[in-house]
Amino acid sequence: MPELPEVETIKKDLSKLIVGKKILDITTDSPKQVQPSLGAVKKAVIGATIKKIERRAKLLQIFLSNGRILAIHLKLTGRLLVRKKGTPQDNWQHVTLALSGNKELRFADLRKFGWVRLVRNEKELGKMLTEFGPEPLDDLNLKEFQSILSSSSRPIKILLMDQKKIAGIGNIYASDALFLAKINPERKADGLNKKEIKRLFEAIEKVLKAG
């Protein structure tokens, strides 16, 4: 599963490769992955130019010149690939955006859990983003981290992966941080003392920066 550092890298790479390109078409062989429907997305995005690409947690957002936004979540096995038009189809390629400059943005996804979703405007996007908690390395500080942990009796690893509590930490980085902090993943979050919480907070920052 792509985790926060990987999704940030994808955002930066796409910003270099497709910002300024016009969307000429969108096609799919997996309609459930294009939301609310392929027809609605086609109508909203064809002819628009990609202005910028942002990321919140693991959610990528492609901002268009007409005010629409394409939100993309890679889930377990999703990949975004920029190819030259005419390049042989990639394995598990299910959604394709034809772009100006003879380019294609391809969404390949073995498990088909990922999705491309049309967002009508920034207000609607804002509501979507409220589902995410604070993000490590950005807007999560030690005091807030301590408050999140002390208010939950769930196993610490489960809590770390709850995107509504802390955004962007998945299975791999949760495991690595807990190992580095010498904390059993099964321990209850509210059972950690202040020294352990500080050690875990620092471990999360370390593994994410290393990633």
Image (tube, grey):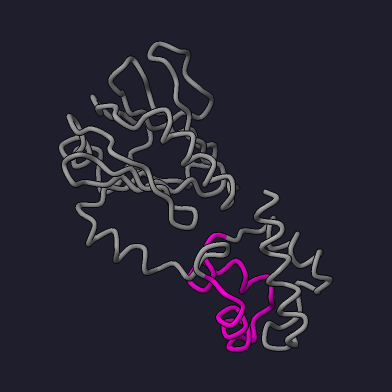
Residue in the picture at 61% in, 78% down: 142
Count of residue discs? 0
Q: Residue furthest right?
A: 182
Residue in the picture at 19% in, 33% down: 48
Q: Left or right of 199: which side holds 103?
A: left
Q: Which image quarter: residue 104?
A: top left
Q: Position of residue 161 (x, y in %)?
A: 60, 66
Residue in the picture at 52% in, 46% down: 8
Looking at the image, residue 141 lies above or below residue 118: below
Q: Position of residue 1 (x, y in %)?
A: 60, 48
Q: Which image quarter: residue 34?
A: top left
Residue in the picture at 46% in, 28% down: 93
Q: Position of residue 81 (x, y in %)?
A: 48, 29
Q: Residue furthest top?
A: 86
Asked whether 44 falls inside the magenta stretch, the response is no
Q: 139 and 38: which one is in front? A: 139
Q: Position of residue 106 (x, y in %)?
A: 42, 29
Asked whether 165 falls inside the magenta stretch, the response is yes
Range covered by the magenta-colored residues: 140-168
Looking at the image, residue 117 lies above or below residue 92: below
Q: Left or right of 191: which side holds 7?
A: left
Q: 25 and 173: which one is in front? A: 173
Looking at the image, residue 187 lies above or below residue 97: below
